[in-house]
Image (cartoon, rainbow, N blue to C red):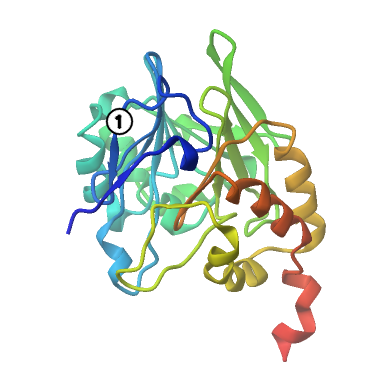
Amino acid sequence: MVRFFKFKLSNIGGFSMEAVKMESVSTTRGGALYEDNGHQFLWLGLDEMEEGNIIQINQYVVRHGSRCIMLDPGGSYTYATVVANLSRYLDLDQIDTLFFSHQDPDVCSGMGLWLNTTKATVMVSRLWTSFLPHFGGVDTNRLKAIPDKGIRVDLGGGDYLEFIPAHFLHSVGNFSVYDSRSKILFSGDIGASIFSPNQHRVFVDDLADHIPRMEGFHKRYMCSNVVCKEWVKRVSRHEIKTIAPQHGAIMVGGAVPKFFDWFGRLSCGVDNLQAIYG
């Protein structure tokens, strides 16, 4: 079933009416989380795996003028669905950059397929450039290593994408991406949530109700509170209106600052080593 979610100014992080030109976002087709005359931040909808045993994933595209950057395109399992959704907004040959936040198969096992169907360059942590070719079909000349300290990509006109270190937050070489125009933070696995079948929500603005869907994953998959606090400090240098994670619901409105507060205080990973070992 196709469900639609009407945008309201109160639950999209304060975007102006000029910024939001789409009146609805379809769970299966996706839509623009932000849109103005020269810039889009697209969400490509839910894949069919949300009802099964394989975790649901989100894909996003930042489109600025002639530039099209895809964020965590996904694995080979979801490639056909993602391409079908993407084709509603642009042609494959318009994608010039594929960004992989880290090395997991749900993020990048479809890389060979994407490299065969686009002319895009791959941006990924320097730690994974020697490992990703093992997925097969990878031209190493098209891999661009992101240094540990991160990098800023100029989009022109003062707009940019900031690749912010998120190391040890699930992966030893990991990055989040901040879009200065839309003020959306693509957080990767940070902020991920898991829903029961048929219960998925595209947007959440009430964090208290949402924490149970995030807590178990974050306590086990994030390294320690030390790195949680460091990440919060780094991303908080930017004005952020929306948090778009790789899994689960997109956080808007009051959920955004409350998530940073919750995550900055989280006891996780090696902090709970004895409990994990039993």
Comparing 255 with 35, the one in front is 255
Q: Is residue 149 left or right of residue 179?
A: right
Q: Residue at x 46, y 67 (%)?
A: 194
Q: Position of residue 85 (x, y in %)?
A: 23, 42
Q: Is residue 113 above or below residue 268?
A: above
**Residue picked out by circle 1:** 22
Q: Is residue 259 above or below residue 21?
A: below
The N terminus appears in which quarter of the rendering? bottom left
Q: Amino acid at mark 1?
A: Met
Q: Residue at x 47, y 24 (%)?
A: 16
Q: Is residue 54 left or right of residue 250?
A: left
The C terminus appears in which quarter of the rendering? bottom right
Residue 130 visible: no
Q: Give the number of marks.
A: 1
Q: Position of residue 34 (x, y in %)?
A: 42, 30
Within 10 angstroms of label 1, few (less than 14), some, or many (20 or more) residues? some
Comparing 89 with 16, the one in front is 16
Indicate the secondary structure of the residue bearing disc 1: loop
Q: Is residue 13 above or below residue 66?
A: below
Q: Quadrant of residue 120?
A: top left
